[in-house]
Image (cartoon, coloured by chain):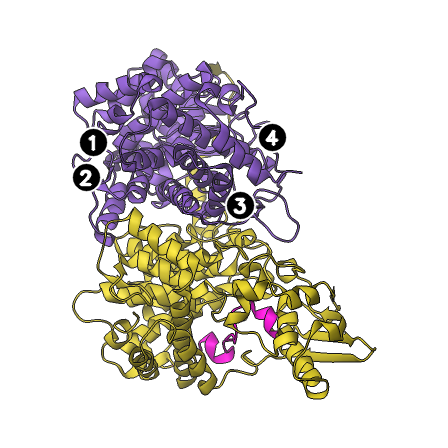
Chain colours: A yellow, B purple
Amino acid sequence: ILCVPQKTIRPLCAIRGMHKSAVEVLERPAPEDTVTASFGQFISGVKPQHLSSVVLHRSKRMVLDSIGVGLLGSTTDVFELALQHCQHMYAPDDISSVYGRRGTKLSPTLAAFVNGVAAHSMDFDDTWHPATHPSGAVLPALLALSERMPGNKPSGLDFLLAFNVGIEIQGRLMRFSNEARNIPKKFHPPSVVGTMGSAAACACLLSLNASQCSHALAIAASLSGAPMANAATQSKPLHIGNASRLGLEAAQLASRGLEASPLVLDAVTGVAGFSAFYEDYMPQPLTSPNGETHTFLLEEQDMGFKRFPAHLGMHWVADAAAAVHKFIVGIESNTVSPAQIQDIMLRVPHSKYINRPFPESEHQARHSFQFNACTALLDGEVTVESFSPAALRRPELLSLLSRVSVEHPHDNPANFDRMYGEVEVTLVGGDVLKGRCDTFYGHWRNPLTNESLRKKFRNNAGVVLPPENVEGLIEAVEGLDELEDCTPLLSQLQ
Amino acid sequence: IMLKELIFGQFISGVKPQHLSSVVLHRSKRMVLDSIGVGLLGSTTDVFELALQHCQHMYAPDDISSVYGRRGTKLSPTLAAFVNGVAAHSMDFDDTWHPATHPSGAVLPALLALSERMPGNKPSGLDFLLAFNVGIEIQGRLMRFSNEARNIPKKFHPPSVVGTMGSAAACACLLSLNASQCSHALAIAASLSGAPMANAATQSKPLHIGNASRLGLEAAQLASRGLEASPLVLDAVTGVAGFSAFYEDYMPQPLTSPNGETHTFLLEEQDMGFKRFPAHLGMHWVADAAAAVHKFIVGIESNTVSPAQIQDIMLRVPHSKYINRPFPESEHQARHSFQFNACTALLDGEVTVESFSPAALRRPELLSLLSRVSVEHPHDNPANFDRMYGEVEVTLVGGDVLKGRCDTFYGHWRNPLTNESLRKKFRNNAGVVLPPENVEGLIEAVEGLDELEDCTPLLSQLQ
């Protein structure tokens, strides 16, 4: 260390101090003008009357579907693993219900975790545009939190409001990036916006003030972001489980006064906030409801529900292949067999993630254009049972798989709003049959009817719950906005 | 071509105590001691209390793993790892490495918590030290996958990226998982990594280390139950990001497994930096430079330095928004302000734990000096802990100009704290919450850690 006196004369600049503090004020936006603050204000200020009838209806369908896929998901190995992990690593607790397991309860964040794992364990949960699976990240946290609240449980309408806040925040955040509109490459979207949505929903249910709501989002940002490489592995469901759990945790920490960056959603050069998860990032403030109205994104952009447990992209080729199957069965014989098929060409978007010629696991099969097309070609449909160990190894399926090739037409983008699926089958003997699907049944442009949705729910929930609970849940969700107390929802989950 | 994740998994499962050289043993024991000390002092902070109460209220009571400095308070293992990790980083007093991260606070709390959970015999001190060094090594290896990692970070806070992975590796090692399970532990941890830099220099920052510790332990536990994740998480795969998601440039390298007797741990080649006061590492350069000027002024002018003597102050420091804060408004911001630390050292001749107290933050003489500071970023002063310097040029009323310069502060890896200084820091820290017999007992336990048949003497004196 050196200290050297220098006899140089330096000019005075007596007013520098004032200049600096003035510059500082100009460079930093007033706290209430930031995007981050606008989100906090929205979450704390939005009210039940801001939920239109369309939004109420659509979100109740989401709640029902999410519970159903979660209940079915409670039969999976990964759910069992997650549950046992929680039961062994933490002291027993008796607060929040575990899907489908009568008498099994956990601490709230752990119940949110395992139920979130269940929701995503079979890739059967809802999908939105831009792409994410919004409900599984939010609903388990709200259910767990509601069970924890002492005294009166939240009303059904307050519960629905918090749920819709969790969905809305996810949609708003995804619109900060054009990158979000295509099949993701870097971070798995539920792990990015899902955590934030869960934090927002829980902050809403906890009635945190605007500042606390902002901090809940900021704390959640430090718990967001799982790389895509872990998708299509056994770990993927944990992305949603963790989104739910860690978002709830963020809201709880904020309720205790923990603070994080007040600029987390804003674009600040040189210091990344939520922008860290995106290549392009253009945040927009969220306008708080004035008086009577706020247009939720769900009003303008409906939800997609799956008819079978696989990546959304599979539904296009499944419907296209099913059309070919129907034709063959109609004219050729009662079944489709590999002996009839010479080759199969799929025209699908380019996405490494779901292009798997020879899937080697159930998870990979749920993310394979080839597998789902061949299954639908053989069976006329893809169902829950299409992914069983026996079905995965069927000789006739493996035989068909070896005859599949894939093209990526330029007009077929990796985008759930604009993609299509084409299945072209050349029969032995030369006939060529082509099926094409632009909008599968269940897509937001061709939504499942209420009948179809309830049928899916009964099939799912009925695997683990007695019929009276199944019907009780349908009834509770249908009338959720009129329940003074959401206990009928909470008490029938196991 | 072997997948890098598997190679890392083989290293973690295959490395043995005999691969720890005496240099590595010595240096890592210093890290363990320092980390416990800063964690104990950190148990007196508000953010620690908040984290602890959160855990106690959100989970059922459990009696497994000790909480730093709180006699009788135990939690479930991951929660103890969490709060102790928060404590370790709560005052920015923990160790710093190159490339930059705070490695020990992410690893040690998880290992302590896990050790207390193990039924029957606790791990030997040597096994404990091996796992600790594995956790450090993995962090160093991963940071070398990116050139971006060598400079002050902009996107993700490094402890939240490599710290989680290091904790997972260390716990996988202590749990004696096989190579495949060790690989999956890393892959599972990758999905729990990555907190944005915006939350650094806020009250939440310590949670980055607390969560790194906790979630890495969790990843190892899930892997031990057979959970699998991507086998490619460390490799560079076009179109599907793994661990590469956290970096702009990413060039992964395989890790050679120990063959026979030797493996050169990074810690052997690159020593650790320990802080003398609780602030960002960059502060130590300007503090030492300003302290030299203080000493000179006190020597020739009078017994104290007062603002009346100072006309203006010029700091020559690297360009980094993160630590350039002309008027810090909180303790956290003050710990990340070149200006604050330079002025404090100029006034007092040093920066200490007490320099960040609420009263000290508001001192009129300090605020007065702050308004006279300007900052330059010379081109030869990069935002890099291995190459930066700090210069403090003070123009006195009357025209004299005094200049202090620090190229390597005392405590930097090029000028390491002596064992005496390190122990003094430990006693000052630990002594705030522990009785003297525990303080000395911990020094003794850590000093002889590699010879303890059972690491209980370490575990039992933390509160």
> Label 3 sits on what residue type?
Gly
Dot 2: element: loop
Residue B379's label in the rendered image is 4
- Residue A307 lies in magenta, yes or no? yes
Point out the frontmost of discs 4 and 2.
Answer: 2
Please give the residue where the numbered disc 3 appears in the rendered image: A270
Question: Which numbered marker is on residue B73?
Answer: 2
Q: Which of label 1 and label 4 is nearer to you? A: 1
Residue B301 versus residue B95 in the image, above or below: above
Same chain assignment for discs 3 and 1: no
Label 3 to label 2: alpha-carbon separation: 41 Å
Magenta stretch: give its range: A293-316
Q: Quadrant of the N terminus of chain B?
A: top right
In the rendered image, the quadrant that contains the C terminus of chain B is top left
- For the residue marked with disc 4, what is the amino acid? His
- Badge 1 sits on which subunit? B
Residue A455, magenta (yes or no)? no
Judging by the rendered image, the residue that carries numbered circle 1 is: B463
Q: Kindly indicate whether the residue at mark 1 contacts the one at mark 2 (C-beta within 8 angstroms).
A: yes
Going 29% across and 56% down the picture, which residue do you hit?
A252
Q: Is residue A258 above or below residue B385?
A: below
Which chain contains the residue that carries disc 3? A
Secondary structure category for the residue under label 1: loop
Label 1 crowd (10 A; few <14 / some 14-19 / many >=20):
some
